[in-house]
Image (cartoon, grey):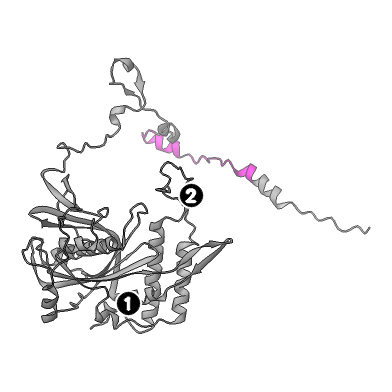
Amino acid sequence: MRFTVVVQAQHIGNAFKQIWKVQHKRKVLDFGMREQIEAKGIKVVDAAELLNLKRVIPSILPQETEGKDLIISETLIPKPREQNHTHPDWHDQPCRIYNDHTSLFTGIDEGLHVAKTCLVANNLPDRVLSFKAKAPEEIHERMQKAVLSAHSLDALQEKLPIAVNIKKPGWSFPRSYGLPRWRRNVQLVNKMFHTMDLALANQNIDVTQQQFTSEISVKAPLTLDGQPSLFEIRQNQLVFGKKPLQPYVDGEIKAELLSNPLPSIYPLSRSISIHERNIYRREHKFPVRQGAPFDHLTMSIFFINKPFMKYTGTQVQGRLLLHSFSAAAAYAQQRYGKDVKELPEPVTINCVQTDSRNFYFGCFQLHSLDLDSSQGAHNLFWVEGPQPMFAKCDYVNNQPVLEGYNPEVLETLMALYKSQMVAP
């Protein structure tokens, strides 16, 4: 065997361990700062002693613990406020409150009565459909990657809600980890708008005309059945523009549509699902002040984040209707005053609702906030849906798989978005 030159090399792992043994305890160098500070009459206290100081609080508990010193007194622990007349927001007169957890008993028919709205058609207005066109293939390829990223490739893992099987009420399922629904909704919608901005920018459309706000709470105080009411919802995303949307219908067509009777919900009351509360703050709240560069509401986007809230098809449409009405009412009160009843000009917004798979699209045209009027409908509503984004998006044999991608969802949303930036 031939002898070679001995290589004087160290093992990298052993070298790193040796360095860690030496440097894992850093020495505090003395620069003489303490003596200089004390010479000026300033007291120096060791930080470790100050942080580890246990401040003893004398006990004021009953006799069995009298004479003992407690580190934390039970009287310092904040107690939840009692839900009675001692609450600072208590009112003797109850208020009907509509919020994100309200589920309409009869679905959209009940919502039409609450908002005094006429359902024009189960389709979008013709002006919006005129902007609908087939998107390029590379746009859909980008969107499919976005769906996979939002549903399967996201690294966030949280403990998911407890699974419930109504056929086995006593069965305890093991807790699973995965992507929560709110995360999928946020990721998917953001990627959809980013993809649409790229596509519309290639068509020489100025996409900077629209600005977004996220996780905003809006409030609109109104009167329902002679009682004070409050429409309080959380807007997951709002889109604002420099110019308001023009009405979809007007003149004789609007008068003809509003002359149609509302669907019957007899023997139920229209406010059966909107419960009364004595603890509330009946105030108006809107995120953008009047006169801002982007102060005109053009689109509202709602997420269905609660997996335990089960909705039927008409209940989801009713939720979209009243959420859109709440956003439009808060915007109208910001624009025309909090006491406005008949709007000088109609308020028109587009609306979208999704649970990260199914999409509901709609358009709402607000003319009046007088919910106790003896007349029939005052407002107009178009709704389309549901449109599933895909059939399956999951892991199969440890590989992310997307099946049944529906290009109609992106093209419909792009038509709504484009109609807000192109003059009719």
Read off the magenta span. Answer: 20-43
Point out the residue furthest to the front here.
267
Please indicate, yes or no, whether residue 366 appears anywhere in the rendered image. Answer: no
Q: Residue at position x 30%, y 70% from top?
A: 361
Point out the residue furthest to the right here.
1
Q: Nearer the viewer, mark 1 or mark 2?
A: 2
From the viewer's perspective, tell me whether residue 356 is left or right of residue 116: right
Residue assigned mark 2: 176
> Helix or strand or loop: what does disc 2 sit on?
loop
- From this view, report whether residue 385 is shown above or below residue 1: below
Can you say which quadrant of the picture contains the N terminus?
A: bottom right
Q: Position of residue 273 (x, y in %)?
A: 20, 53
Q: Residue at position x 20%, y 63% from top?
A: 109
Q: Position of residue 288 (x, y in %)?
A: 21, 64
> Helix or strand or loop: what does disc 1 sit on?
helix
- Residue 307 location, quadrant: bottom left
- Residue 112 location, quadrant: bottom left
Give amino acid for label 1.
Val
| Frontmost residue, 41 versus 54 | 54
Can you say which quadrant of the picture contains the C terminus?
A: bottom left
- In the drawing, what numbered circle is on residue 207? 1
From the viewer's perspective, tell me whether residue 144 is left or right of residue 93: right
Gap between marks 1 and 2 measured at Cα: 41 Å
Q: Judge the density around disc 1: few (<14), some (14-19), many (≥20) Cα neighbours within 10 Å.
A: some
Please indicate, yes or no, whether residue 152 appears anywhere in the rendered image. Answer: yes
Q: Residue at position x 58%, y 60% from top?
A: 398
Q: Residue at position x 42%, y 55% from top?
A: 180
Give amino acid for label 2.
Ser
Q: Position of residue 405 (x, y in %)?
A: 45, 72
- From this view, report whether residue 26 is shown above or below residue 386: above
> Which callout, 1 or 2, points at the residue further toward the start of the chain?
2
From the viewer's perspective, tell me whether residue 117 is left or right of residue 239: left
